[in-house]
Structure formats: structure tokens, C-alpha cells
Amino acid sequence: MEVQAAATIVSTNPATGEVLGELGCSTPEEVQAAVARAKAIQPQWQATPVRERVALLRRFQQRLRERGNEVASLICREAGKPTAEALATEVLVVLDATEFCIRNAERFLREKPLPHANPAMKSKRGRLVREAYGVIGIISPWNYPFSIPAIETLGALVTGNAVVLKPSELTPLVALELQGLFLGAGLDRELMQVVIGEGSVGAALTESAIDKLIFTGSVATGKRVAEAAAGRLLPVVLELGGKDPMIVLDDANLEVASSGALWGAFMNAGQTCLSVERCYVQRSLYEPFLAKCREKIARLRVGNGINSEVEIGPMIHARQLKIVEDQVNDAIQRGARVLAGGQRLSELGPNFYAPTLLADVSNDMRLMQEETFGPVLPVAAFDTDEEAVRWANDSNFGLAASVWTRNRKRGETIATKIKAGTVMLNDMISCFGIAEAPHGGFKQSGIGRTHGELGLQEMVQAKYLDADLLPRMKKVWWFGYGTAYQQQIEGLTDVLFARSWIARLKGGLRSAGLLRRDKF
Ligand code: NDP
């Protein structure tokens, strides 16, 4: 039986259940029409001088700075994270990413000469041009409903593309707020459109005439998107899930590492692609580390994030909470020790789960292999650096990892052995807030990069432009073949690549007739 696509979606506050708004869903025809309108206007935008596109970003940045608190408060109400966290991890991050685009777009888009080493090609001038794709489709998740689509949209627009964004059905209002900021900055409304609805609207966008797709979401959906895109060789960037390991070496600062582990595992109620999902602590530090974490968890305040004293908000919905609960229960049944949490906080509402500390976990537990996406810190002890690396790499994911140590050399040696898109020493997650740092994963964590220069690179196609400086001369490699020509080419090969000078000289003599031979 075919499932009927919803006609409307309802946005609700995960902390209170309050309905924030009901929105009509875009039909597949409306998605196609949006892409067609974007396609029609995009060449005009691409022809606009980069300086003018940068000026638009500057106006966007100023509007966001002025409205930052309202944006953060909306993120809090629609996605559940504390307002202060929304300000720090979404608004501020986007302001900085905008600054990166403003400062770097012109340099990045400038044509680059490509000098030719081969003497036979010296009569040509080559250059590398970076050209916009056209219309970039963006499909984004609910956990960073502002920063993810904003950073991708900024990169797409400044390089001359138009954007059609399909936000998560759970956070459409934040996406519309983002669109409002761009329109308020003076952007033509067809250059940044938002299509609303469930997964089927994302599927319609994937099948539409977009020229590239930037998808952020789960591995399961990412694979479906990649299959659909493969049918028409649509280029895609996939930013997928993570199972990030945190390795705490025996020389780490216990106070700092325990605080880092808590923020890394529990911020945004653990619903961060880069969150600490597995923690490996060297045996001599294991029990003291657990004791510190336990003591600090008791001080964390869980509740409605609109209250500025709250540190951990609700999870996004009951389905996500159930996944976390099942993984935790499975781990407990298989021998994990609960040191904190391990249960719902029903008195706060249906979507609240207590920050949970589990000890003595092992890598064969679901909790250590599947993405958890909840406020859970599972900890295991290790003995040697090699063992820590082996466990960290024992995963289908490879988004990011962190190593905690006072010995930078030791930490970097481990970092080089970890299969992940980012490895941080003595911190985690903050790489997302470093505008220059590329973001993306190894293995099933994805394909391609967003953020920084590599993120801009995904928004353009490389075009090689070449001008021949001797337009009145036929080329020596054109038709008019024969025995003499073959010997001349053999000679040329020696001139260019023979190791000995004598062979080069002989080659020179043999190839001498090349320029004079008859060509047609
Ligand atoms: P989903 O994969 O469920 O959804 C992601 C987006 O895809 C949503 O907009 C969703 O719409 C849409 N979608 C669903 N089905 C389809 C389809 N068939 N074709 C096209 N689009 C579709 O992820 P979540 O929203 O639950 O986000 C959480 C996941 O995102 C986690 O796995 C997390 O690790 C990952 N993530 C990765 C990041 C990274 O940078 N690597 C950053 C942040 C999150 P709808 O919501 O309406 O169903």
C-alpha cells in the first residue's frame, strides 16, 4: 500500500508539546517548480560580481547579529536545546562562517594560472576557473536546524549558486527564519527557497533538476539518497552519522577531561553528530575519571531550555528516546554498570532522559556500535595506546575523534592512526565552530566536506580554460602521420624524458623535422 504524503506538518516544542505552527507541505510539482524558478534566475546571480554577493552576506550577517537572541529562542522552542547553547553553537558559528565567506570568497573564486611544464605545451596559457553548479539542493536534519543549512547556503550563494532547502519536518520554522534573514538582506526570493514536508519532499528534491545535493542526516537515509542520486549521476555530499570515540590517556588532566566528556556527550541532549559516543580511558585513570564524571553529572540541570539555568533540554521526540533507552538497557543486560541516569525523567515531560554514565561497556554492545544520539556517556578501560587506537577504529563510522593528553606528540601519534575526518587533541565538537576547518567523515560517516575552503570547493565545478598563443600554426601532433613522423615523436619522447644528455641530444636531432612536416 502506498503511503500518502502528508498535506501539512505540525511543528511542536519538544519540551512542552506546545504546537508552534502548522504548515502546508510542498507537493512534488511544487518542488519541481521551485527548482525551475531557481534555475531561471541563477545565471543572473552567477553573473553578479563577487563583491556584490559578498555585500549581501555582510547584510545577512548584520541582520543575524541584531536578531541573534530571537533566532536562538526559536531554535530552543523548536529543537529543544538551551537558548544559550543555540546562541553559542548555532548563531555564533554562523556569524563566523559568514565572516569566512566574506573574507575568502573573492580569493577562492579568482582564476588561477596553471603554468605548463612540458615544453611542447609552452605555447598555451591555461587557467583554472571555479564555476557555480547552478541550483544546490540542501536537505538538512533537525539537530542543528539553523547552522547546518545556513553554512551550506552561505557557501552556495557566495559562489554563485541558487539554493532550494528541504529542512527536517521537525524544524521547519527555523528554516523559514533563515530564509527570512536572507530575504531581509535583499536576496531575490527565488535564489533561496524552502520546500516544506516529510522525507518524501526530500526525495522529490533529490529527483528534481537540481545540479548538486548537500545532504545531512542518518546513514540509512543517506544511502537511500545516494541510490536515488546515482540513477542520474547527481553529485552529492553526504554528511552522515558518527560514533565518535574519546581517548583519555593516563597523562590527561582529569579535571578537564571529565568536564569535556560531559559536555561532549550531553550537549544538545547528546543529539550531535560530533558528540562523544564512546569513551576509552587508560586503566590507571579509569575509576578516578568515572568518579569525577559522576560527581559532575549530579550538578547538571535538566529541563526546558528556555530557562537560562538549564544545561540539558529534552530529546527531539519519543521515538529517539526509545532508541536510546533500548541501547542502554541492552548494555545493562550485558554487564554495563550504571553510575548515573539510565532512566527517563517523566516528571519533566515525555521527551526527557537523564544524563547517563555507564561503565564497563564493551565494543560488541549495540551502544558502542550503533549511533546513540542521546545523553549517554559509555566508558571502557584500556591498557595500551595501541589498544585504544584499535577500539577507536572498530566502527563503521569515522566522523571525528578526540585524544586527551598533556603530551602533544603522543596525542598526535595516536591521531594519525585514527580513521576519522577530524581528530582533536584535548577538545571535541568545537571543530564545527572553526570556520576554516573542513567538516566531514571517513567510512560510513559520509562523502565530501562542508565548511572552510573544502566546503566552498564542493559548491563549484573546476573548469580548465586554455588559450593557444599560436592560432595560425597547425599542431605538430595532428594528422599527416608516417614513418618519419613516428621517428620524430620517438625523438621528442627522448628529448623530454631520457635520463642521459646524449640520448636527449640524439632525440633532438631525430625530432628536428617535427615543426616543418606536412600536416592537414
Ligand atoms: P534523517 O536521515 O532522518 O533525515 C535527514 C533529512 O533527510 C531530513 O530533512 C529528512 O526529512 C530527510 N529525508 C528523509 N527521508 C528522505 C528521503 N528518502 N530522501 C531525501 N530526504 C529524506 O536524519 P535526522 O533528521 O534524524 O538527523 C539526525 C542524523 O543526522 C544523525 O544520524 C546525525 O548523526 C546526522 N547528522 C550528521 C551531521 C554531519 O555533519 N555529519 C550533522 C548533524 C546530523 P524528515 O525529517 O522530514 O523526515
Image (tube, rainbow, N blue to C red):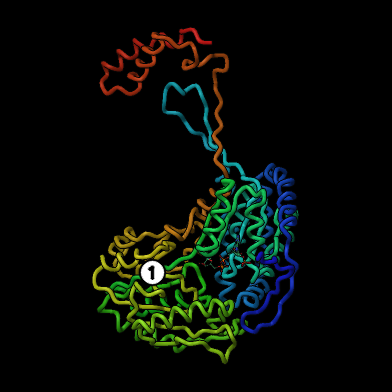
Would you identify the image quadrant in which residue 61 lies? bottom right
Q: Which residue is mark 1?
A: 245
Would you identify the image quadrant in which residue 79 lies? bottom right
Q: Amino acid at mark 1?
A: Pro
Please tell me which residue is depicted at 65% across the width and 62% down the height of the picture: 200
Q: Is mark 1 within 8 Å of ligand 1?
A: no
Please tell me which residue is depicted at 34% across the width and 78% down the height of the picture: 361
**Residue 435: image x %, image y %?**
52, 59
In this picture, residue 1 sits left or right of residue 121: right
Please tell me which residue is depicted at 48% across the width and 10% down the height of the picture: 480
**Residue 339: image x %, image y %?**
38, 87
| Ligand 1 occupies quarter | bottom right
- The relative height of residue 432 versus residue 78 in the rendered view (above or below) is above
Q: Is residue 454 visible?
A: yes
Task: Work out whether residue 274 or residue 446 is closer to the camera in this orientation and state it.
Answer: 446
In this picture, residue 116 sits left or right of residue 497: right
In this picture, residue 491 sits left or right of residue 71: left
Please tell me which residue is depicted at 55% across the width and 22% down the height of the picture: 468
**Residue 29: image x %, image y %?**
74, 55
Total numbered labels placed on residues in the image: 1
Would you identify the image quadrant in which residue 411 lies? bottom left
Q: Is residue 64 visible?
A: no
Viewport quadrant of the N terminus? bottom right
- The relative height of residue 508 versus residue 156 in the rendered view (above or below) is above
Q: Secondary structure at mark 1?
A: strand
**Residue 164: image x %, image y %?**
67, 56
- The relative height of residue 468 versus residue 464 in the rendered view (above or below) is above
Task: Work out whether residue 233 or residue 263 is closer to the camera in this orientation and state it.
Answer: 233
Q: Can you name the residue that lies furthest to the front here? A: 1
